[in-house]
Amino acid sequence: MGLFTVDQARIELAKLRPVIDELIVVRADLVEISAALTPGGLPTTLGGLPERKAAEARLNELMTAIQETGAELKGVAPLLVDFPADLVLGDLGEVPVLLCWLEGDAELTWYHRADLGFAGRRPLGDRTGA
């Protein structure tokens, strides 16, 4: 997939919500099971090695499902999903950006220039993109 408009990215994020929600649960389960399997780890009711392997496989499937949309999965803990786009940024004109959703964000309301990374994250405001 190519570039997203802001509206397209918001629609795609809404479609991805069930995948994202499941990914967060599977990620937590995987961490808990892995901790229980370490020497001295607290026991868990989630299972053992077979369940950890199943959780790892499912986590990979969910991450792939996100990336197959054209979105970029940049982080898993916390979950960070970027949608490539172009935005008009004042005198710079149309600039490559990443529409940026971070776990805990209610909606897609942030972006950063592609060359600046997460540290350059800014609110979208009324920008609608190309």
Image: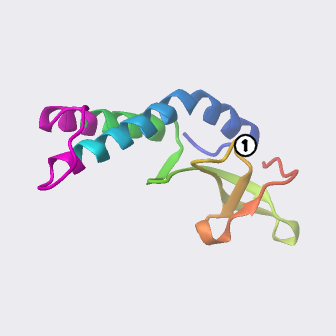
Identify the residue shown where x is 15% and y is 53%: 38
Q: Is residue 76 part of the magenta span, yes or no?
A: no
- Give the image location of residue 12, x and y in percent: 62, 33
Quadrant in the picture for residue 32 = top left
Q: How many marks?
A: 1
User: Range of the magenta residues?
Assistant: 35-56
Work out whether residue 4 can be spotted.
Answer: yes
Question: Considering the image in quadrants, where does the N terminus appear?
Answer: top right
The kind of residue on which mark 1 rests is Thr
Q: Is residue 55 part of the magenta span, yes or no?
A: yes
- Give the image location of residue 92, x and y in percent: 81, 70
Front residue of 124 and 25 = 25
Q: Is residue 87 left or right of residue 117?
A: right
Identify the residue shown where x is 31% and y is 32%: 58
Work out whether residue 115 can be spotted.
Answer: no
Circle 1 SS class: loop
- Give the image location of residue 17, x and y in percent: 57, 31
Front residue of 84 and 42 = 42
Identify the residue shown where x is 79% and y is 55%: 124
Quadrant in the picture for residue 120 = bottom right
Image colouring: rainbow
Identify the residue shown where x is 36% and y is 36%: 26
Q: Disc 1 marks which residue?
A: 5
